[in-house]
Image (cartoon, rainbow, N blue to C red):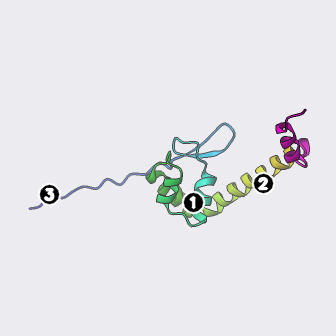
């Protein structure tokens, strides 16, 4: 009689953590959920994502994509909020530090005065 292998079915922990600023990161890396999902939505395979971000673990990327596919509406809402927040920060920075003419000012610093 052949030995029967027992397969243990156990819940897996999703490799996502939220940092102090509320940014969700993948595994024990600084790579954000935004980065992985955006790459996936642009057609990158999990292997290509890991190749582009070597600090990621391939199984973590597959788990994160699975999480996204099962909770698409929630993750899309999070990603939308992150995009809006980035836009607000960009607008604030442009308001405080006018970018017009910056190239000319930087080039002027490089030109020796004489």
Q: Which residues are magenta?
A: 94-114
| Dot in front, 1 or 2 | 2
Q: Residue at x 28, y 56 (%)?
A: 7
Q: Secondary structure at mark 2?
A: helix
Dot 3 alpha-carbon crowd within 10 angstroms: few under 14, some 14 to 19, many 20 or more: few
| Dot in front, 2 or 3 | 2
Q: Is residue 36 above or below residue 17?
A: below
Question: Are discs 3 and 1 less than 8 Å apart at CB?
Answer: no
Q: Residue at x 53, y 59 (%)?
A: 65
Q: Secondary structure at mark 1?
A: helix
Q: Is residue 105 above or below residue 73?
A: above
**In the image: residue 16, left or right of residue 5:** right
| Dot in front, 3 or 1 | 1
Q: Residue at x 90, y 45 (%)?
A: 98
Q: Which residue is mark 2?
A: 84
**In the image: residue 20, left or right of residue 66:** right
Q: CA distance from mark 2 to mark 3?
A: 57 Å
Q: CA distance from mark 3 to mark 1?
A: 38 Å
How many circles with numbers are drawn on the protein?
3
């Amino acid at each position: 009689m052949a030995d029967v292998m027992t397969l243990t079915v156990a819940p897996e922990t999703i490799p996502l953590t939220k940092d102090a600023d509320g940014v969700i990161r993948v595994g024990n890396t600084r790579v954000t959920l935004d980065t992985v999902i955006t790459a996936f939505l642009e057609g990158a395979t999990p292997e290509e994502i890991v190749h582009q971000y070597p600090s990621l673990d391939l199984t973590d990327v597959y788990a994160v994509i699975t999480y996204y596919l099962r909770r698409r509406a929630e993750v899309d809402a999070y990603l939308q909020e992150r995009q809006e927040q980035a836009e607000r920060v960009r607008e604030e920075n442009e308001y405080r530090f006018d970018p017009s003419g910056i190239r000319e000012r930087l080039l002027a610093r490089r030109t020796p005065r004489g």
